[in-house]
Image (spheres, rainbow, N blue to C red):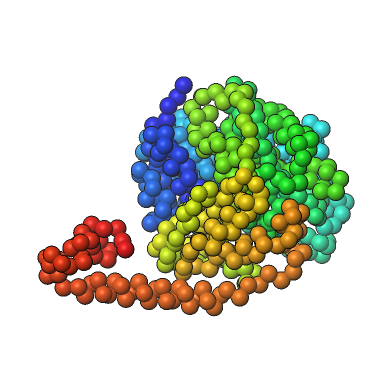
Amino acid sequence: MTRFKKILVANRGEIAVRIMRACREMNIQTVAVYSDADRAALHTRVADEAVHIGASPPRESYLNIEKIIDAAKKTNADAIHPGYGFLAENADFAQAVDDAGIVFIGPSPFSIRARGDKAQARARMMKSGVPVVPGFQDADDEESLARAADEIGYPILIKAAAGGGGKAMRVVGTASDFTEALAAARREALHAFGDARVILEKYVANARHIEFQILADKFGNTVHLFERECSIQRRHQKIIEETPSPLLDNDLRERMGSAAVAAARAVNYENAGTIEFIVNPDTRDFYFLEMNTRLQVEHPITELTTGLDLVQWQLRIAQGERYGERSVQQRGHAIECRIYAEDPSNNFLPSTGRVLDLELPQMPGVRADSGIETDDEASAFYDPLLVKLIAYAETRDAAIAKMQNALREFVLLGVTTNVEFLQAVLEHETFREGKATTRFLEEIGDWRLETGDWRLETALIAAAVVELLEKKVSDVPVSSANDPYSPWRANGAFRAGGGAASGF
């Protein structure tokens, strides 16, 4: 069995940090890659080594296969972990890693093509008898797509064939809007995934979005680790996830779990993956939506309710370890809130700037996965996800209450976030009753929050305080450091920006 000594993480942000910390627990060294915009990013500081791979635009850095593999070779990395997004579901990348004699921590290129590619996945599911949403994936030219959209019937959903994460998706209500929406989806798909191909699906309103976590080793052992509900979305981007789903009973959970395992086994799937379904809450019929051949953003809620470290199991399976048929039980309830650098009061416009202060909640049952620290920059080049807060408790009501407390204690100054928006969702009666569908945020009306003014004022005050403190410290006479009664002597001769102490 292979034992990794060094792993290159081909990603950035909180997921890169998450992977690196899992590696550290397994005594595996890590290599970060970074763009111009990420020269001082947290993931470069957490890693044992860091390699510059290009300019800030993703196509010149995090989507550049040749540069990433070259960085792995130069640092003698045994394996590459793709994280999520960027090249995580790119079969050409997985193949190039294999061809370079480096282990790809994920499924085989064949499985990625068969499942990660939305067009091929739909075709295979239909052939296997798995129910799918009516759609079209047989051609990619505009004329064929427009004709298919008319046959399917509006509203339809345009989706990137080579990606996920809610990116490059457009709901089209009428034929007159199709051409413009198609062009926009193609541009976003090319930027995010390096592939402009799209597929069409009938847009199913008032559905529930439920996915099953899959784990499969190299010996044919494939299991599901229960479901995650991801119905709270804006612009097809998940913002709150939970497990177990308040919709599922034991019978529906068993049927959907069995379908998820069968879908993975059909292509000899290995490593961690996710089978996504949409469910009609009235009829309880479910349909295959897509398979994500990677780790999901929301994987922490599964970890908290099962006690498994999914990243470490990714590494262990890639090393050739047997997962086996071990029994896993789900305990309690977990909720994840994604904290984005965006302004809910201004149509969720992304926010950029320097993080003046970041204080993460410290309480039992709360986990924070962060890709930033105080003084880091929220960049305009990448996804605005900054921090994930995860709350765990014995019951759903207790988990919601714990998450609300965690959000109250969360502090981030200098960049506008969606924290108040998340609190408002958690307070809403429809969410608390467990009845929210994927159209929940569209149906509840105007969510504009009057937060912009006080956040700006707070940020300016914080910046002024920091500047004043730095000035006061710099004004302290040098002789005071030799004064036995000086507070600076008691604090290890601390000075702003240096000294023995790390801060106040």
Is 479 placed above or below 376 here? below
Quadrant of residue 345 within the rendered picture: bottom right
Quadrant of residue 106 within the rendered picture: top right
* Residue for point 48% across, 64% down: 412
In the image, 80 versus 224, the foreground residue is 224
Is 56 placed above or below 3 here? below
Q: Position of residue 473 (x, y in %)?
A: 25, 71
Asked if residue 184 can be seen in this view, the reply is no
Q: Position of residue 30 (x, y in %)?
A: 40, 40
Is 215 placed above or below 41 here? above
In the image, 145 versus 438, the foreground residue is 438
* Residue for point 45% across, 39% down: 22
* Residue for point 20% across, 65% down: 488
Q: Position of residue 312 (x, y in %)?
A: 50, 35
Drawn side of residue 314 relative to residue 128, left or right: left
Asked if residue 216 can be seen in this view, the reply is yes
Q: Position of residue 80 (x, y in %)?
A: 47, 37
In the image, 208 versus 38, the foreground residue is 208
Drawn side of residue 410 relative to residue 469, left or right: right
Drawn side of residue 332 relative to residue 476, left or right: right
* Residue for point 47% across, 42% down: 19
Drawn side of residue 496 relative to residue 165, left or right: left
Q: How many marks?
A: 0
Figure quadrant of the C terminus: bottom left
Quadrant of residue 328 within the rendered picture: top right
In the image, 161 versus 271, the foreground residue is 271
Is 461 placed above or below 20 here? below
